[in-house]
Structures are given as C-alpha cells and as structure tokens.
C-alpha cells in the first residue's frame, strides 16, 4: 500500500511572533520553524498502518515550501518514513490554500497513493482548506478531523470516527482516500537516534514547477484568490491592578471596577 503524509513547516508554538515593518507578513528572521503539530499525527498514522500491514507498504512524506521545510521532512524520515518529496520553486511562493493544494495534488498523481494523511489544519493560518482541496483535485473520498481510524480487512475500505460539533460521526471510506488528523488519533513517536542518523543519509526528492506540468499562472501569488491584506499584532494587555484591603472591601471594590471600568456587569 502506498501511504502519504502531507506536512507543513510552521513557526514553533513557543516562538514570539512579530509583524514585519509594512504589516504584510510575520518577521521570519530568528524564528524556529517546526513540523505542524497536527501533521505529526498524520505521519504517525501512516507509519502505524505500514507496521500493521507488514506487506512492503511505503510511507512518503511531502511538503511544499522554502528550504527550511527540509528539516521537517528529515524529522518525518527519522520517525520512520521511507521517502520524502520537497516541492520547491520560487513560482510556488505566495500561494493560497487552493493554489498550494493544486501543486500538492499534481505532485501526488505519479505516486498514486492509496491513503493520504494530513493534519486537520496548519497552526499558522488555521484555514483548514488545503486537505479537502487536495482530495477534490485528486478525486479521493475524504474524512476530516479524524479521531479514530481503522483500515478494513480487505484493504479497500476504512472506517473513520470524525469530530463534529456536538459529537462524533462514523463514516466508511472507499480507498483511495484522504484523512485529516485531529489530536488524540494516536500518540506520535519520537525519532530514535538510529532513525535520525539514517534520515541524514536519505535523499529528499526536489520537485519544481517544470516537473508537475502546471502553468505558472495557476500557482503561487499570481493565482492566489485570497491573501492577507494586513497583519496586526495583538493589543498589549493592560497591567494587572491589585486591590488592597480586607477580603470584604476587596470584593466590594472588585464589583465596582467590573461595573464602572470594565463595564461587564
């Protein structure tokens, strides 16, 4: 079985984000980038299925972006993935969810995956648009926000429990299919030292625009149908106000402040 995990390189959750001078993007200098946390569940799920089947199945990890995404690809290889594909071309820069999904889909066509796993969303823009768009471009059945996954005994179907508002929904998919992964689907493994050493020697296949047959006008910034018009930093929190006195007086003053200043009661 051909298993694919799509991964994205995003700012570390502990990074301090700053807006650049003209407000068009974040300042990337000095920021640590890591594999999107939800994509870790995608890589782990693909590896679990490979280990379950024991039939020579392969796991390929795919990422689109600048040179820094290589580090995330190597992390996935160290976890146990067999192959890695890096979609790298200046023409891809500035693409929106639809344009990026189009590139990913075209790159996956020669792979002909049976199952594609990806995170439910990237933690940078939280759009959650790329997974369903990739599935549509490839004509795959899809289940989003999966919290449980079970491959059918015939290897041609899968049962997925997906998180929906107010409860869970259980769906049956016919393979090939795409599944986006939610926290709780599994417990991503840590890369072992031998895995890290092996990953350093594994080839990462580079794919440019010329390799996938798309017109330049259908990818990148020129094809973007949505873009960030202006980025604004979060307003600074006001300083903490300490209320002196005995508990009874403190409670009375707190109520007055909530009513007169905060105006929430």
Image: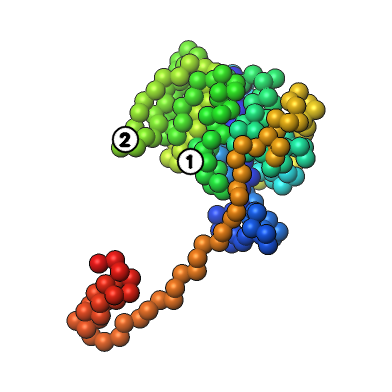
Quadrant of res 221: top right
Residue 201, image x and y in percent?
Answer: 77, 38
- Please tell me which of labels 2 and 1 falls first in the chain: 2
Q: Which residue is mark 1?
A: 187
Dot 2: within a 10 Å radius of its alpha carbon, few (fewer than 14), some, or many (20 or more) residues? Answer: few
Dot 1: within a 10 Å radius of its alpha carbon, few (fewer than 14), some, or many (20 or more) residues? Answer: few
Specify whether 211 is left or right of 230. Answer: right
Q: Determine the residue positioned at 55% across, 25% down.
A: 135
Q: Determine the residue positioned at 34% across, 32% down.
A: 168
Mark 2 → mark 1, Cα distance in angstroms: 22 Å
Question: Can the viewer see residue 131 in this picture?
Answer: yes
Residue 22, image x and y in percent?
Answer: 67, 59
Q: Which mark is residue 228?
A: none
Residue 160, image x and y in percent?
Answer: 42, 26
When the figure is inspected, residue 125 is found, relative to residue 52, above or below; the finding is: below
When the figure is inspected, residue 234 is found, relative to residue 79, above or below; the finding is: below
When the figure is inspected, residue 15 is found, relative to residue 63, above or below; the finding is: below
Q: Determine the residue positioned at 45% across, 34% down.
A: 145
Which of pointers 2 and 1 indicates the residue nearer the eye?
Answer: 2
Q: Which mark is residue 167?
A: 2
Quadrant of res 159: top left
User: As drawn, which residue projects farthest toward the left?
Assistant: 248
Specify whether 220 is left or right of 41. Answer: right
Residue 112, image x and y in percent?
Answer: 64, 19
Question: Can the viewer see residue 47 in this picture?
Answer: no
Specify whether 160 is left or right of 264. Answer: right
Q: Determine the residue positioned at 80% across, 28% down.
A: 210
């Amino acid at each position: 079985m051909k298993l694919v995990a799509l991964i994205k390189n995003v700012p570390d959750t502990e990074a301090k984000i700053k807006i650049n001078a003209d407000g068009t993007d974040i300042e990337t200098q000095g920021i640590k980038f890591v594999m999107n946390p939800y994509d870790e569940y995608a890589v782990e799920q693909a590896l679990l299925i490979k280990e379950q089947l024991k039939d020579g199945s392969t796991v390929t990890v795919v990422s689109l972006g600048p040179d820094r995404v290589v580090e995330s690809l190597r992390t996935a290889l160290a976890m146990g993935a067999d192959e890695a594909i890096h979609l790298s071309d200046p023409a891809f820069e500035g693409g929106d969810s639809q344009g990026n999904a189009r590139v990913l889909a075209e790159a996956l066509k020669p792979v002909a995956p049976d199952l594609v796993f990806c995170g439910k969303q990237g933690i940078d823009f939280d759009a959650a648009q790329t997974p369903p768009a990739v599935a549509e471009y490839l004509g795959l059945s899809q289940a989003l926000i999966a919290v449980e996954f079970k491959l059918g005994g015939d290897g041609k179907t899968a049962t997925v429990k997906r998180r929906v508002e107010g409860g869970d929904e259980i769906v049956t998919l016919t393979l090939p299919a795409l599944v986006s992964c939610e926290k709780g689907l599994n417990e991503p493994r840590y890369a072992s030292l031998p895995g890290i050493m092996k990953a350093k020697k594994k080839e990462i296949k580079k794919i440019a625009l010329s390799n996938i047959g798309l017109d330049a006008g259908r990818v990148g910034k020129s094809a973007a149908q949505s873009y960030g018009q202006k980025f604004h930093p979060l307003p600074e929190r006001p300083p903490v106000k300490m209320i002196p006195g005995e508990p009874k007086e403190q409670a009375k003053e707190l109520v007055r402040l909530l009513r007169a200043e905060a105006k929430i009661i």
